[in-house]
Image: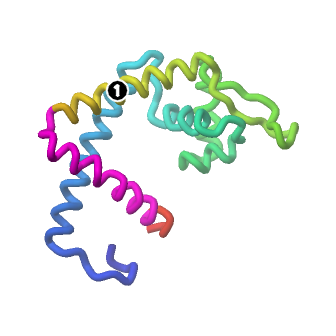
Amino acid sequence: MQGDGAEPPSEAQREAAGKLADAGEAIADLMREAAASVEPRLTPPGLKVMSVVSDSPGRTLTAVAAAVGLSLPRASRVCTALESAGLLLRRPAATDRREIGLEVSPGGRALLERFRAKRRERMAAVLRRMPEEERCALVAALGELAFAVAAVGSEGG
């Protein structure tokens, strides 16, 4: 936060940031558990690639690598492994037949649906353990949190 021209965070902001970081790590662990419970198992980069390609079919390997933050050689290895597992397809790109676009195979879509269902199930279990008032406040705050995360991400800091 410092170095961006803003005031240093207050003690309350530092405490909130620590709690948010702890919650984020707990949620990340929960998501890893959800991913591990779905067969075939995917690595975190594999799952990220599958999600990006599912959201934007036809993206090139270069675009997918950039979107998931992998080097081109690493992204290529991940995509090759996914293709070998029958989860990803390579097809000539619609805009330029010399380029290859990536698509999630029907089996890959089924895997993503199982993972997303397991993820929702795990998060629903967490939310059921929260008092209703706090759960409602959390849901209301999540939209603002997503907006703030996107703003910080677009700042590059």
Label total for image:
1
Task: Name the spot of residue 20 as percent of width and height, x first.
Answer: 24, 54
Quadrant into which the N terminus falls: bottom left
Above or below, 5 against 134 in this view is below
- Residue 81 drawn in magenta: no
The region drawn magenta spans 129-152
Task: Name the spot of residue 87 as percent of width and height, x first.
Answer: 60, 21
- The residue sitting at the left extreme is 131
Which residue is under mark 1? 34
- Count residues near mark 1 (Cα–Cα under 10 Å), then give few for <14, some for 14-19, many for 20+: many
**Residue 130 image-quadrant placement:** top left
Task: Name the spot of residue 24 as percent of width and height, x first.
Answer: 28, 47
Helix, strand or loop at mark 1: helix
Q: Is 71 on the left or on the right of 115, as rendered?
A: right
Q: Residue at x 19, y 61 (%)?
A: 16
- The residue sitting at the right extreme is 97
Above or below, 89 against 3 in this view is above
Q: Amino acid at mark 1?
A: Ala
